[in-house]
Image: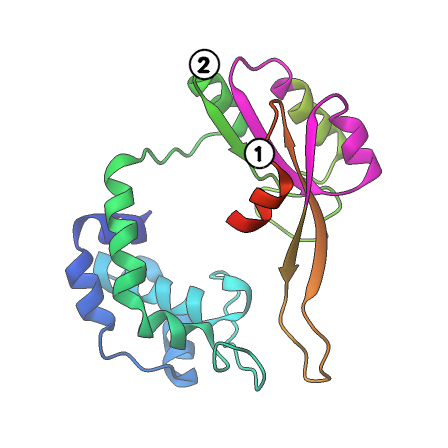
Amino acid sequence: MNFFRIVKQMPEDFLEELEWELVSRAEFNRLADLDPRTLDPLPRARRFFYLIMGGWGGESNYPRFQTSINDGGHGNRLIGALKTLRQRILPVHERLKTVIIENLPWDAILERYDSDGTLFYLDPPYPGNGVNYAHNMPSWSDHQHLAARLAQLKGKWIVSSYDRPEVRMLYGGSHIVPIESASGMASAGGRGRTTNQEILVCNFIPIPIQEVKHVR
């Protein structure tokens, strides 16, 4: 939230803070060792951006400096992020002028904003994801609860998940669009990124799949 506040209220100051920045393991480790609660808002936002873009997996709680000899981002995503910083930040600044950021349980969000004119997009932790999210849905009953609640909504909704038989069965009767997504990085041995088979589940008739691929 501090990062969003800075980008919304002080975009030029944030850009100036990073304008002449370099990508350095020493600087990454220095920032990782700082307690963000001791920093003023602007340096704290800079630290957050540096660690998120310069580390593996965007993990701010367990920052690890990213290096690679065969990544298209020249070994570290922060290099490309700094090169195109203004093009990245200013559209976010404009977008944040017209959004509401909530911090509520998902069912409270659905209850508050449901209407005939609402479109919800839900990207919950996928079942069996094997990731230690801070707010995970490890139990299959959690996903059953989500599906049952969605079935009661007035508005339209889209849910993304793995393309697995049990997920398709959970949302039986809904419209399903298969998609592919890539994760990870190319390895030193020449192996490519992992291709994930996913689906978008909708309670309305979606656009044709070829158009979905074009948008992605």
Numbered badge on residue 115: 2
Discs 1/2, front: 1
Dot 1 falls on a residue whose secondary structure is loop
Query: Marks 1 and 2, Cα distance to the nearest angstrom?
Result: 22 Å
Instruction: Assess disc 1: are there few (<14), some (14-19) or many (≥20) residues with their C-alpha within 10 Å of its C-alpha.
Output: few
Residue 178 seen in this snapshot: yes
Q: Nearer the viewer, residue 18 or 83?
A: 83
Three-letter code for the amino acid on which mark 1 is drawn? Ile
28 relative to 201 in the view: left or right:
left
Q: Nearer the viewer, residue 31 or 187?
A: 187
Residue 33 seen in this snapshot: no
The earlier-in-sequence mark between 1 and 2 is 2
Q: Residue visible at 61% across and 34% down?
A: 159
Q: Relative to 77, does residue 145 appear above or below in the rendering?
A: above
Q: Residue visible at 66% across and 32% down?
A: 201
Q: Nearer the viewer, residue 2 or 81?
A: 81
Three-letter code for the amino acid on which mark 2 is drawn? Ser
Dot 2 falls on a residue whose secondary structure is loop
Q: Residue visible at 51% across and 17% down?
A: 155
Q: Which residues are magenta?
A: 149-178
Image coordinates for residue 174, horizontal then vertical, percent: 70, 24
Image coordinates for residue 195, horizontal then vertical, percent: 71, 60
32 relative to 211 in the view: left or right:
left
Q: Nearer the viewer, residue 139 or 205?
A: 205
Q: Residue visible at 56% across and 26% down?
A: 157
Q: Relative to 84, does residue 127 appear above or below in the rendering?
A: above
Q: Are marks 1 and 2 in contact (CB under 8 Å)?
A: no
Q: Quadrant of residue 52?
A: bottom left
Image coordinates for residue 152, horizontal then vertical, percent: 61, 13
Q: Which residue is mark 1?
A: 207
Q: How many marks?
A: 2
